[in-house]
Amino acid sequence: MNQAAGEPFDTSVEGHSGSWPELPSTWSFSSLSEVESCARRYSLDKATYPDIWERSGYPGLPSLPQIEGNVVHGCLEQIMNEINGVSNAMPHPERVVAALQSLGGYSTVINAAVETEVNKLRANPRSRDRVTSLESELRRKQGEMRLDIQIRLSRVPDLSGAPRVSTESGHVPRGRALSFGSHPEVRLEASALRLTGIADLIVVEEEACEIRDYKTGQPKEGHEDQLRFYALLWAKDSEKNPREIPVTRLAADYKDGEQVFDPPSEQDLERLENIVRDRVASADAAVTAGPPEARPSPECRSNWCPVRHLCDEYWASEFSAPDPEPGFCDLELTGTDESGPRSWFMSSVHYSERLLVRAKTPTQADAISESSDRGVRALNVRITESEEGPMTVRLTRFSEVWPLVSSPNS
């Protein structure tokens, strides 16, 4: 694969030809981190695939925790925007109640956010076998999400008496300075550095500013780095922060509590600026190289790289091999011999004996049957041993099957 912006490329997976992405005009914290982890993953994920769908980028792999996080973020944004329209002569808890009454209550807000996420799943080609189950899980978790939202709202600083913030729905518009108050989903830009990012919540006071980032998982080392990145953006965004109000508090907001970090000093910001300049230059070079470097690692599987089935280097590496103990793994399977309904005997380079492969869904079964002469790449399958018969490869509702263009042995 040779990469140039907009140039076509082919993969070993059937129907997965695409065009490489253009160099981004700005980089975010997450996109820089993705390129540094694996430039091939970033490029395959951001490429366009006209035979799959009309949108840019590769369809994302649906994850219940990620979707839950989207619902919580969406609800917090909507409620905070509504709070900003309520008289702030009232204490914060009373403003929350008034805002929710205007919106129809927690259930109405959460139901609408869930429906938005379900509609995204319906449009995603990788979700068609899981829309119903994911929607059921989301509906079942609405009580938990409601409690999560309530807890996070209770942590928002009480700015009773500060001037009212006038916001319409959604992000704070580009070019509009942030007034006193709490602002959800603020896009910050440092044009000279080619950096951008969306802060979950920025609380602006007379001579102080808090940046808060909502997290749905557990604390990680990189969360502080992300908040410091936002602090640099805030310092460099002359449109959102023309008065150069300093960041005085950084908070990572988790379901079970918050972590507060010291804001960077002016000297820290200068050092960080130099670091990100180098990171941007390195990222530019990495994604315009031909081909972008692939870096197979254990994280490809443990972190569910969404495009690993398209990466030949991953499949040729030791990291695609199953663990010594049976469990979940990825397998390249060839030589289909039907054994029964939704079951086949197939071969893998990692096993001397043939494996009994059992599909869970009609989509998985069709993919295996239609590629009998070429083989497949199967993701997130479970291997079990049997004392009386062959090892069994069981496909679950989380497994994916990708037919190959040609047999790996040809």
Image: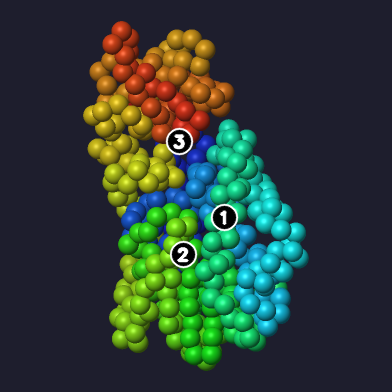
Residue at which label 1 appears: 147
Q: Which mark is residue 223?
A: none
Comparing 206 with 167, the one in front is 206
Q: Amino acid at mark 1?
A: Leu
In this view of the protein, can residue 158 be seen by the observer?
yes
Counting residues from the N terminus, which is met first, the one under dot 1 or under dot 2?
1
- Compared to residue 67, the image places residue 91 above or below, namely below
Can you tell which quarter of the image residue 235 is in? bottom left
Counting residues from the N terminus, which is met first, the one under dot 2 or under dot 3?
3
Residue at which label 2 appears: 253
Label 2 neighbour load within 10 Å: few <14, some 14-19, many 20+: many
Q: x%, y% of residue 291?
A: 35, 52
Label 2 and label 3: CA atoms lie apart by 40 Å
Can you tell which quarter of the image residue 320 is in? top left
Q: Amino acid at mark 3?
A: Val
Q: Amino acid at mark 2?
A: Asp
Label 1 neighbour load within 10 Å: few <14, some 14-19, many 20+: few
Q: Disc 1 vs disc 2: which is toward the camera?
A: 1
Residue at 37% x, 46% y is 303
Comparing 338 with 254, the one in front is 254
